[in-house]
Amino acid sequence: MLLTTENLGKRYERRGVAVDALRAVDLEIEERAFVAVTGPSGSGKTTLLLTLAGLLKPTAGRIRFRDKQLEGFSDAQWASFRHANLGFVMQNFSLVPYLSARENVTLPLAIAGSKGAAQKKRATELLERVGLGDRASHLPRELSAGQQQRVAIARALANEPALVLADEPTGNLDPALATDVLDLLRSLNEESGTAILMVTHSPEAARAGTHRVHIEDGLVVDASLQPA
Amino acid sequence: MNLAGVAWKELSHRRSSLVSGLVAITLGIAVIVGVRSVTVASEHAVAVKLDSLGANVLVLPQGATVDDYHTADIDAPTFPEEYVERMVTSALLGVENISPKLTRRLKVEGTPLVLTGILPDSEVASKPTWQLEGLEGATVEHVCSGKLGAHADPRLQRKVIDVLGEDECILGYEAAHRLNKREGDTIEVEGVTLTVNTVLSATGTVDDDRLFMHLHAMQEMLGIGAQVSAIEVMGCCEQISEGLLSKLRNVLPDTRVTGIAQIVSTQIETNRLMDKISWGILVIVLLVGGLSIGNYMWGNVTQRRREIGILRMLGARRARIIGLLLAKAIVLGIVGGLLGYALGTLVVTIMGPDTLGLQVRALPGWLGGSVLLAVTVAVLGSLLPAWLASRFDPSANMQEI
């Protein structure tokens, strides 16, 4: 099993009022799975994704990634974990505006301290794989929204992660571009075997996943974790 | 690419922000260097002006009083002229000029006068009126500022008298009037004939009633051997405040070494005041400069929240985020320090003479200091913003974008 959560909970304090964003979430995500997490706005989908990435601290429960228990990790351990095992694709691309497409893709490699030539080779390969080999030196503002999201997907794969966390990856794209991006994610999942956990409120996007989880009010109300 | 490369890209991407940051640091350092240069120049000018007040240390025979020196009675005590050599060979720091004097009250052609024997090559024409009388000689090198050489301002230059021969004398205004003598006239003193070299203009001091002649000629005339009544010393005010008087007492234990209180205390107090003002300004400028740099860095960090969140998301540790922001501060500090030094020095050296009436010189020793200061202030001003940036909640950032 790639990732398991047991009774995962996240409680916020907002103006003195406790809000349970996640309540006793139990999940099991297999290696190479493509899981679509759906639910209405404010249901806790993004909180679940951020908690699994260590970007939010859970207030209850356990998280296991392969043979590692993650819930007690320090900030530095989480940073190393994210860097070694996770890739991210966010709704509005999260690209650094003053870095070219290639430089954005090399960011995870730069953080790892890999050498310049190796970075460049890897970034070029990935950009070609997402169909942007000829746009490597373009800045994000010189690319369309769909192209920017492709750069973000290439970056997510730079360090060969076991799991890509995608938060509404098609949220800012028109339907045609959304389909392109979903096709790309699906092909990467099938070809590279990288597991994907994609949060989306769109039923169409959710159909790209091989597994489904539906969350409402912080609770998993439907988990079709068997292949669709 | 590495994270330093990311910092460099950010610098070149946000040029307007870079320029405003550089301007903040450059101006801060320029003000510090400018103020310091002007302060050093004005301290020097004030010190030279104070030193030009004349002799500020008097060496008298043991048991003699300052009154004895001024009244110059016939039986006033004396001590050997060789003491001058002793002072010279002791190589005391801060002794700018030594002038031995022998004074005696005598009747000259029936008129009571004070005769003062001086050594022309060590007697300083410190009073402007003396210099106006054509008594100028070689310019005395200043040692008080720590640099040998004459002062650029002619009003502050002091020169020894090199025109007084052993058969000549200089008459004070009143003495000449009473003796009815003019330049070129001869005068009989104790059987010796002297030619009046110069008649001084009225100075309003005891000099008006005096007849100045060569010390050695006066010693021979009086038959008292190589004796003097006093040694007037021009001490640098800085060294006087650091204990020159007691050092002189050690060299000449059987004499009375006294500071001319009013001159010395003025010199010391002014020196201290200048020093305090200088450091006060420096502290204020440092605080203001540091705050403005910190403010700039905070603005920059806030502007970069999103990127910092992206880097944290991708696995950059907090220490690397802090390093990334401090790298920028160091680059800005080095460039701003160099530019600030150049600007500050250029402005005060060009504008100093016209606007301040001061010859301001560059302080090369401050070049390294300016860069170090700029880097230190930039790093200190950035530490808190960088630390806070490393604590940004990346999840809030992720949801926000």
Image: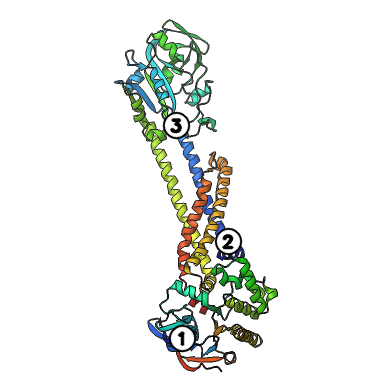
The residue positioned farthest toward the right in the image shown: A134
Q: Can you identify the residue that label 2 sits on?
A: B18
Q: Chain of mark 3?
A: B
* Viewer-nearest residue: A218 or A225: A225
Q: Amino acid at mark 2?
A: Leu
Distance, label 3 to label 2, CA atoms, is 48 Å
Which of the two marks, 1 or 3, is nearer to us in this view?
A: 1
Q: Chain of mark 1?
A: A
Where residue B263 sits: x, y (%)? 39, 31
For the N terminus of chain B, the image quarter is: bottom right
Q: Is residue B101 above or below residue B266?
A: above
* SS class, disc 3: helix
Neighbor class of circle 3 (other Cα within 10 Å; few <14, some 14-19, many 20+) is: many
Q: Amino acid at mark 3?
A: Asp
Q: Is residue B94 left or right of residue A101?
A: left
Q: Can you identify the residue that label 3 sits on?
A: B51
Neighbor class of circle 2 (other Cα within 10 Å; few <14, some 14-19, many 20+) is: some
Where residue B9 sits: x, y (%)? 60, 65
In the rendered image, residues at marks 2 and 1 fall on the same chain: no
Which of the two marks, 2 or 1, is nearer to us in this view?
A: 1
Q: Is residue B267 left or right of residue B355?
A: left
* Viewer-nearest residue: A219 or A2: A2
Q: Can you identify the residue that label 1 sits on?
A: A4
Q: Residue at x 47, y 8 (%)?
A: B187
Distance, label 2 to label 1, CA atoms, is 47 Å
Kindly tell me whether residue B292 is visible in this rendering. no
* SS class, disc 2: helix
